[in-house]
Image (cartoon, rainbow, N blue to C red):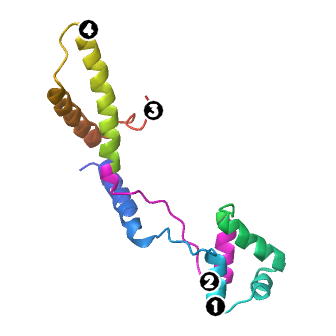
């Protein structure tokens, strides 16, 4: 196995495993307020730990709820409360499924273009053969991971 494929597999394992570790279940009040209250820490106490005003803490809590807070700010707040901020992006399914779905889109486009040209010469393929060719090409594209797989056609 090539180094490139080994590295790609490591990335796939990392991304696929993140789904189990990350959750999108944000408390209604946001994590800052929820953790602060769970610890029994007042806004003033958190503000003192960060050497900022109480208003800055209230603003950070509002910014988190409105999804405008920065990652750096979340990290500082988490650390001030004795925690750590975890950030991640996870797919809605396995990486390989996302790659195969994209390969199918690309293959469908390629096969349709080819079949349109063939139709001009009255050599168009029947739908069942088109589907087989599309799936075969999609699997090939997914396996090769062509550099233009994610390019917009």
Looking at the rendered image, the disc whose residue lies closer to the viewer, 4 or 2, is 4
Q: Position of residue 38 (x, y in %)?
A: 61, 89
Determine whether the residue tagged by mark 1 lies in a helix, strand or loop: helix
Note whether 11 is above or below 46 in the view shown: above
Q: Earlier in the sequence, mark 2 or mark 3?
A: 2
Residue position for label 4: 120
Q: CA distance from mark 2 to mark 3?
A: 42 Å
Q: Which residue is mark 1?
A: 39
Residues in magenta, as a range: 72-97
Q: What is the CA distance from the residue labelled 3 to the residue labelled 4?
A: 26 Å
Q: Which quadrant: the C terminus?
A: top left
Question: What is the crowding at mark 4: few (fewer than 14 residues within 10 Å), some, or many (at least 20)?
Answer: few
First in sequence: mark 3 vs mark 1: 1
Inspect the magenta stretch and tell me whether residue 46 lies in it.
no
Instruction: Determine contact: label 2, label 3, CB under 8 Å.
Output: no
Q: What residue is at 69 percent from the left and 60 percent from the top? A: 68
Mark 4 / mark 2, whichever is N-terminal: 2
Could one spot residue 52 in this view of the protein?
no
Tags 3 and 1 in contact by the CB under 8 Å rule?
no
**Crowd class of label 2 (few under 14; some 14 to 19; many from 20; radius 10 Å):** some
**Is residue 83 located in the magenta-colored stretch of the structure?**
yes
88 or 68, which lies in front?
A: 68
Of the image marks 3 and 4, the number of the one nearer the N terminus: 4
Q: Which dot marks residue 152?
A: 3
Among the 4 quarters of the image, the one containing residue 76: bottom right
Instruction: Say which element carries label 4.
Output: helix
State the image quarter where residue 33 is shown: bottom right
């Amino acid at each position: 196995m090539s180094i490139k494929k080994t590295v790609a597999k490591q990335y796939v394992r990392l991304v696929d495993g993140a789904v189990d570790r990350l959750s999108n279940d944000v408390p209604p009040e946001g994590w800052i307020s929820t953790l602060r209250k769970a610890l029994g820490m007042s806004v003033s106490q958190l503000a003192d730990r960060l050497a900022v005003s109480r208003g800055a803490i209230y603003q950070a809590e509002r910014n988190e709820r409105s999804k405008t807070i920065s990652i750096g700010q979340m990290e500082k707040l988490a650390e001030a409360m004795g925690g750590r901020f975890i950030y991640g992006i996870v797919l809605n399914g396995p990486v390989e499924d996302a790659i195969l779905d994209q390969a199918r889109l690309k293959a469908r486009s390629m096969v349709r273009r080819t079949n349109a040209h063939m139709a001009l010469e009255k050599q168009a393929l029947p739908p069942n053969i088109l589907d087989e060719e599309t799936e075969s090409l999609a699997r090939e594209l997914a396996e090769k991971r062509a550099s233009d797989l994610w390019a917009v056609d």
